[in-house]
Amino acid sequence: MRKEYLMTPGPTPVPPEVLISQARPIFHHRTPRYTNILVSVEEDLKQVFQTKNDILIFAASGTGAMESAVSNLFSAGDKVIIGSNGKFGDRLVQIAEVYGLNPVKLEYEWDQVVNPADIEKHLKEDPNNEIKGVLVVQSETSTGILNDVKTIGNIVKDYPAVFVVDSITGLGAVDVKSDEWNLDVVMTGSQKGLMLPPGLCCVSVSEKAWKAVESSTLPTFYFSYEKSRKALHKASPTNPFTPPISLMVGLQEALKMMREEGRENVIKRHALLAEAVRQGVQTIGLELFAPPEGRGNAVTPVRVPDGIDGTQIVKIMRDKYGITIAGGQEHLKGKIFRIGHLGYFDRFDIIVTLAGVEMALYELGYPVELGSAVAAAQKVFMENPL
Ligand SMILES: *Cc1c(COP(=O)(O)O)cnc(C)c1O
């Protein structure tokens, strides 16, 4: 017998309460029963997004939300600024290219944060307001780096461009004040901080963004923001097409759990788990990948020590111990490993994962005193009760 532990930044573990809620028989979605769920989910999501804006829901993984933002807000030929310091920033560029936009990619090393001053420079040097949008990933899951969308929002708000934020691993792990920070479009996916299986994504849309939607000429059908908003504003709110009913039931349950814990406590818990991982891995001589100014709460990327093949750490942990962590992507394959702590995670998940990291490194010949990373994390937990 071997127990499985899912310690990745998406998909993330799903709480038993949520799983059980999803096992109930399917019911029809054009009913008061479904409308009640949608209305309650909207209300709770607005708390998580910290917004008064409508939140549109689609049956898709997070990439569907990214694509929907590009196709609903812009037109072919539109100039957009995309800050990219990782795989998901690059994906925004690819989507913009597919739709015929004119993306200007501000490219950063993958261990650097997106510099708000660079975005400001482009906006300042654009007297004819050709820049229609600024797109940034808040929590770059491929590298664990947290970009400062608050500062960027404060810059973009003074220009006609809309600010689009991929907060797919931000929401639920770090603060996201959509309205206060002037984030026009904010998106997330179900299999990240929302503690659900994959298959659902949510997008908030500001007044400024709705103006952009009105002037966009790109074709949309399933992902049409207008259609989605219209259905949401009916006397009995609904979705334009069959929603993922079981996921909506699960979402209601997951949001209830988040509400009961309290938004600030949810973020505090993530910050503490991240701190314990950082202390743990540093205690055994490993280096953090993210710079101090860009460390998020969703996932901790760790540099693999010289002479060790990082893919082996991931493999031993998964195949031998049943602990799935994430490796590095693209040019970071084998060079970093990533420990997820996003969503349904508590202190002992961190203890288990650090113990597994120690054992895998030990097996690979790295000098590690077994139990020392675990002890460092325990110390963090003893000193900072949740
Ligand atoms: C997971 C994720 C996505 C979307 O990926 P899907 O596989 O389509 O769900 C987009 N951006 C970020 C930052 C993510 O972490």
Image (spheres, rainbow, N blue to C red):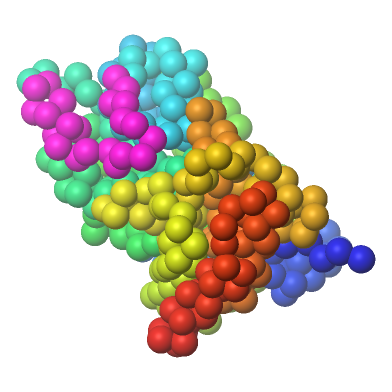
Magenta range is: 104-126
Q: Is residue 109 magenta?
A: yes
Q: Between residue 216 and residue 13, name the one nearer to us.
A: 13
Q: Between residue 268 and residue 212, name the one nearer to us.
A: 268
Number of marks: 0
Q: Position of residue 236 (x, y in %)?
A: 58, 59
Q: Is residue 44 magenta?
A: no
Q: Position of residue 50 (x, y in %)?
A: 36, 63
State the residue at coordinates (77%, 58%): 322
Horizontal side of residue 210 vs 354, given as left or right: left
Figure quadrant of residue 123:
top left
Q: Position of residue 37 (x, y in %)?
A: 63, 65
Q: Position of residue 14 (x, y in %)?
A: 69, 64
Tell me: residue 197, above or below residue 351: above
Can residue 171 be seen in the rendering of this structure?
no
Horizontal side of residue 54 vs 184, given as left or right: right
> Quarter of the image containing the N terminus?
bottom right
Q: Between residue 294 and residue 222, name the one nearer to us.
A: 294
State the residue at coordinates (57%, 62%): 368
Horizontal side of residue 226 vs 365, given as left or right: left
Q: Between residue 36 and residue 276, name the one nearer to us.
A: 276
Horizontal side of residue 34 vs 279, given as left or right: right
Tell me: residue 240, above or below residue 252: above
State the residue at coordinates (57%, 68%): 369
Tell me: residue 33, above or below residue 306: below
